[in-house]
Amino acid sequence: MADKKIILTGDRPTGKLHIGHYVGSLKRRVELQNSGLYDKTFVFIADAQALTDNIDNPEKVRQNVIEVALDYLACGLDPAKSTIFIQSQIPELCELSFYYMDLVTVSRLQRNPTVKTEIQMRNFETSIPVGFFTYPISQAADITAFKATTVPAGEDQEPMIEQAREIVRRFNHIYGETLVEPEILLPTNAVCLRLPGTDGKAKMSKSLGNCIYLSDPADVVEKKIKSMYTDPTHIKVSDPGKLEGNTVFTYLDAFSRPEHFERYLPDYPNLDELKAHYTRGGLGDMKVKKFLAAIMQEELTPIRERRKEFEKDIPAVYEMLRKGCEAARETASATLDEVRKAMKINYFDDAELIAEQAKRFAQE
Ligand code: TRP
């Protein structure tokens, strides 16, 4: 078991998945799933985590569970190769979290930078739900229940993985070698760490309305790209343009490949030449946006079409999830058996313990 390579990652179902999720993690996990380098791949929909700050909006979470499942299948996650499941259906995760809570201090949670920013974003101030505050612990349970070695995720997840690693070390130190320390697998392309929104703002977010969704129809993608933020001082085509903070070029950094130039923009050999022309002046935004749109459509069309196919049989998608939950529970429950044993709370499946106690009392 110890040297197995296991992937685990998940998403909160608070909206449909967008191209930020795609370049940040989704695309990579499909490649990893297909690479044959991993013994197992677990991908899950973190509905219980989504509820930690949406407790009064269960309908939103419920709706988005199926949206995220469809996005997964559309991107090429394959239930024959990956176990796809829903977090809340694995009660073992709650039990693990409960034990892990004893291994983490309040001040350690307060220092978690991701939780800190999220608390600010949600204006929780003094009314932070305990469940939300402790979600890094529950996330450690998600990861360790499956003995994951590798967590493909964006850079915002780094503090979570660090927290999980600390819990694993502490647990193994106290109770003996039981859990596996996970590692985060970040995108190799720096711009993919955090793709900005179409308005140039730092993050794609549903509430800012600056996302391109994987399920957006072609004309919507086209429109969103046409109205994308560029360089506000680049007014006339002849004006020199700036690349810094220019979302269209950031997206080209994330999505364009040499063959795209051959196909859609043969006047330029590569992205560097296109950037040089833009900076010099004489290259209009529309031309660059058209190029980006062609690339994005090439990437998104197959995803969109596959999604449409899966949408035709929704009961089958739920059935796939049900089977995934069943398989996931088996793994989580095996880990929990080991955890209980290590923590000495496995009273009834330990004949030795009972015999030992009987002997002790016989001697007294
Ligand atoms: N926190 C992740 C997100 O915001 C979702 C998540 C929950 C997760 N548990 C995880 C990701 C375990 C990776 C591993 O989308």
Image (cartoon, rainbow, N blue to C red):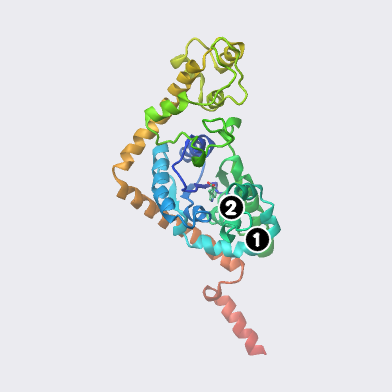
Residue drawn at x 48%, y 17% as measured from the top left: 286
Report the front residue among 325 and 2.
325
Name above or below for residue 283 compared with residue 218. Answer: above
Locate residue 160, reporting x and y percent.
61, 49
Picture quadrant where residue 250 is located: top right
Q: Is residue 128 left or right of residue 304?
A: right
SS at circle 2? loop
Instruction: State the residue position of label 2.
Output: 2
| Identity, as a three-letter code, of the amino acid under mark 2 | Ala
Q: Is residue 26 left or right of residue 124?
A: left
The mark lying in front, picked from 2 and 1, is 1
Q: Disc 1, ligand 1: is the CB inside 8 Å?
A: no
Q: Which circle marks residue 171 in the picture?
A: 1
Determine whether label 2 and label 1 are within 8 Å by CB: no
| Three-letter code for the amino acid on which mark 1 is drawn | Phe
* Disc number placed over residue 57 in the picture, else none: none
- Would residue 192 be found to the left or right of residue 292 on screen? right
Pinpoint residue 334: horizontal percent, then vertical percent: 50, 61
User: Could you say which is closer to the camera, residue 170 or residue 176?
Assistant: 170
Label 1 Cα neighbours within 10 Å, binned few <14 / some 14-19 / many ≥20: many
Mark 2 neighbour density, 10 Å: few (under 14) some (14–19) many (20 or more): few
Q: Considering only order in the chain, which callout, 1 or 2, is on the residue closer to the N terminus?
A: 2
| Whether residue 333 can be seen here | yes
